[in-house]
Every structure is written in structure tokens, then in C-alpha cells.
Image (cartoon, grey):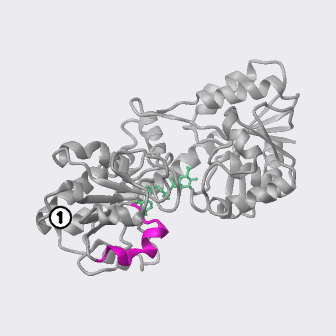
Amino acid sequence: MINVIGLGYIGLPTALMMASHGVEIIGTDYNRKLVATLNEGKTTFKEKGLDELFKQALDSGIMFSTEYQVADTYIISVPTPYDKRFKTVDATYVVEGVKDALKVAPENATIVVESTISPGTIDKYVRPVVEGQSKKINLVHAPERIIPGNMVYELIHNNRTIGADDNEVGEAVKRLYASFCEGIITVTSIQAAEMAKVVENTYRDINIAFANELAKICREGGLDVYEIIQIANQHPRVNILTPGPGVGGHCISVDPWFLVGDYPGLANIILQARKINDGMPRYVIHRISEIMKETGLEDVTRVGLYGLTYKENVDDTRESPTLQILQRMDDALSGGLVQVYDPFIENDIVPNQHHDLQSFIDSVDMVVIMVGHNEIKENMDKLKSKVIFDTRHICGFEGVYTL
Ligand code: SAJ
């Protein structure tokens, strides 16, 4: 039996996927409300294909509890909050999860950490806890790789990394993941698995920073960055990502800092990329001011930001560029209060937040497309009479302003 600890964005889909592939699963979370919601047969966040997967898992007998279980294997998928001041990962939840699992784990049980951690975290914080007690416990790091918005598909199709001290233990965990994962599963050391995970996200951050820098260069040079990238990407060995209003989410905007923090003086391009991407919300504010001047718009309360989440078709607002803009906007735009709307965010989390696309559109003269949700792509015609600043390059109208 497998006990999945932490039923959030990663733990829940993983638990459901395993259960629906015939693995006996109990999901544990300390949050009583969350467990109660799952036990009522409802999912706790929006994600493509999750509700269907949930049904299959329920049919296969998955159970949810607030208690840790006696199990052969524990999968720890708890949050690893990020300390903005010191640019370090806070491994407290992982360590606490491991400690609680150890209280009930039988001899020779395996503890798999899926949460993203900075390289060296297991040796520094987790191993001492495991080795400080009498039972023999196997430690494994199997970093998650699924992308919000396409998690269910990617759980099945992505390749995976399993880091273990002992090859046999690694192979056993590989067999467990192979119950649902059709990708290549590489078994390596814990340290290599930790590093590879952070490197993957750092690579993407650097590539996005390059695209963002190109956007500024092309604006200065009077060229269309999207055309340039499209042409360059026709080269068989070039694959530049897309400029955007900033890099949000809990992964790509965070993980590169671990390398900067641990290897100061060596992680130069990584640091520069972080600075470029973190500077994008400020650049968007600058562009909004420019466009307002150019179009003669003076009333900042008639400017609307479309999208609050960190990217399209998810309900996650962590490190979202829109939230960063709203924090900075007060000074930059003379304290004006813009209008905001996101179809995925039902609660009021910012001032002047609308809950209906039409009421939002009616309240503004200028729409800043911050997130390319399907909703706006399908309703683009409704923006026809507005000044449009499209930071995501999803609107094909003439005269649209871009980054
Ligand atoms: N973004 C751009 N331009 C692009 C691509 C993305 O500006 O061309 C922005 C997005 O709008 C968003 C941010 O970057 O604000 C990050 O979004 P994302 O879709 O690139 O990635 P995440 O953070 O949702 O998920 C990433 C994935 N990692 C990689 O692709 C290497 C995912 O596979 C990981 O599982 C996840 O991080 C994680 O949890 O580590």
C-alpha cells in the first residue's frame, strides 16, 4: 500500500493516477477541510481531466485521510515554500512529513520525496532525520515534472527521474511509477535527481529571459520580435520560447535562485535571467504608460488587466505577473486603480475585480491581456473597440500593441 502525503497540485493527481492504475492508495493531508471535500467526491482545484481521473480513482477504491498510514511506500508531495529574502527553499514541510511518516513506517519502508527541493536538501535536512532512528528506511527523490494545465497527460507521458542510494530500491520505485508512466524512467543518485530537476526549470527560465530580452531589443530596433523568433526557430537547432509579462508560478521563478544562492559567482547567466524575468512586470507598466500617452488615454481607472493567474487556463496565482504589476502600479501610474478580471478566480483577491467578462469590458477603454485563457481567445471580438495591449501575442487584430 502507498501513502501519498500532501494532496495539493502534485500529490492529488499522482495519487489519483496511481489508484486508477490499480495501486492501493491512501492519500493523507493535514488539512481537514481538503480531506472532507475529497471524501465528498469533489476535487479541490481546476485542472484539465482531473475530475474524470478522480472518478476512476474513486471507483478503484482510493481513500483520503488526515492520518498517516502504515504503508510500504510514502510519497511526500508537500509544499516547499520559498523564502524570498534569502532566496532559499524552506524544507520544513518535507522534514515534518518524513518525521510523521517515520512514526508509523514499518522496517524497510521507502520514503519518496516528490516535492521540488534545492540540490543537497535531502543530505542536509532529510537524511539526518531518517538515520537518527533505529528502523532501516530507504530514501528516494522522484522530482515531479508535470506542467499545470496538462498534468494528467504529462503524468502518463513524461519521462521521469528516480534518485536513490540503492539501485535495487530505485528499480522498485521505478516499477511503481511504471504502473502509469509510459515515459523513460531514469534511475540515478539522489543528488543527481535533485540537481537535474532544478536545472530543467532553470533552462526554461533562461530561454524565456532570452525571449524577453529579444522583445526589448526588437522594440528598440523597430522589428517584430514574434516574426524574428518564428524565423529563427525554423533553424533546426534553435527553439526560442515566447516573450511574456513575467515568469510566475512556484517553480521556474523560484528554482534558479537555489543555484544562484549555492553557487554565487558561478551562476551568472542564471542570475541575469532571473533579473530579466523579474523585471518584466515593471516593463509592462512602462509600456502601459507609453501606450496611454500614444492613444491619449488619461484615466487609469479605465485600464483593465485581463488575467490574474500566472499562466493560461489554470487557477493558480502564485508569483503571478499581474499581482506583481498591481503591487507596483500605484506609484508608477499615479495611484490609479485599474480594473481586473480573471474567469478562474471566483473570490475577490484584489480591488476592482470583476466576475463577468462583459462587465469588465464595459468598464475599460484599454485591455491589457496578461493571460491567454481560452475564454479571451474565444471572445476576442468583444475587444474590437478597445485599445488592446497584448502581452501574450494571442490577438491577431490590426493595431494591437505588443511588448
Ligand atoms: N512563460 C513565458 N514564455 C514561455 C513559456 C512560459 O513567459 O514561452 C511564463 C508563463 O506564462 C508562466 C511561467 O513562464 O508565467 C512559467 O510557466 P511554464 O508553463 O513555463 O511552467 P510551470 O511553472 O507551469 O511548470 C514548470 C515546468 N517545467 C519545465 O517546463 C521545465 C513543469 O514541467 C514543472 O513540473 C514545473 O515547472 C515544476 O513544478 O517544477
Image quadrant where residue 244 sits: bottom left
Report if residue 374 lies within the magenta region.
Answer: yes
Mark 1 lies within 8 Å of ligand 1 (Cβ measured): no
- Count how many numbered circles sit on residues in the image: 1
Q: Could you tell me which quadrant the C terminus lies in?
A: bottom left
- Residue 242 visible from this viewpoint: no
Q: Foreground residue, 211 or 151?
A: 151
- Determine whether the residue tagged by mark 1 lies in a helix, strand or loop: helix
**Which secondary structure type mostly characterizes the magenta part of the structure?**
helix
Report if residue 181 lies within the magenta region.
Answer: no
- Taking the image as shown, residue 18 lies to the left or right of residue 9, namely right
- Taking the image as shown, residue 28 lies to the left or right of residue 290, namely right
Q: Position of residue 164 (x, y in %)?
A: 73, 41
Q: Residue at x 23, y 64 (%)?
A: 217
Q: Position of residue 94 (x, y in %)?
A: 64, 32
Image quadrant where residue 134 sits: top right
- The residue to which callout 1 is attached is 291
User: Label 1 sits on what residue type?
Assistant: Ile
Image quadrant where residue 219 sits: bottom left
- Residue 382 visible from this viewpoint: yes
Q: Position of residue 249 (x, y in %)?
A: 48, 49
Counting other residues with Cα less than 10 Å from the Cα at mark 1, is it few (<14), some (14-19), or many (20 or more)?
Answer: some
Q: Residue at x 86, y 32 (%)?
A: 70
Q: Could you tell me which quadrant the N terminus lies in?
A: top right
Q: Position of residue 79 (x, y in %)?
A: 59, 38
Which residues are the magenta region? Answer: 371-384
Q: Residue at x 56, y 36 (%)?
A: 80
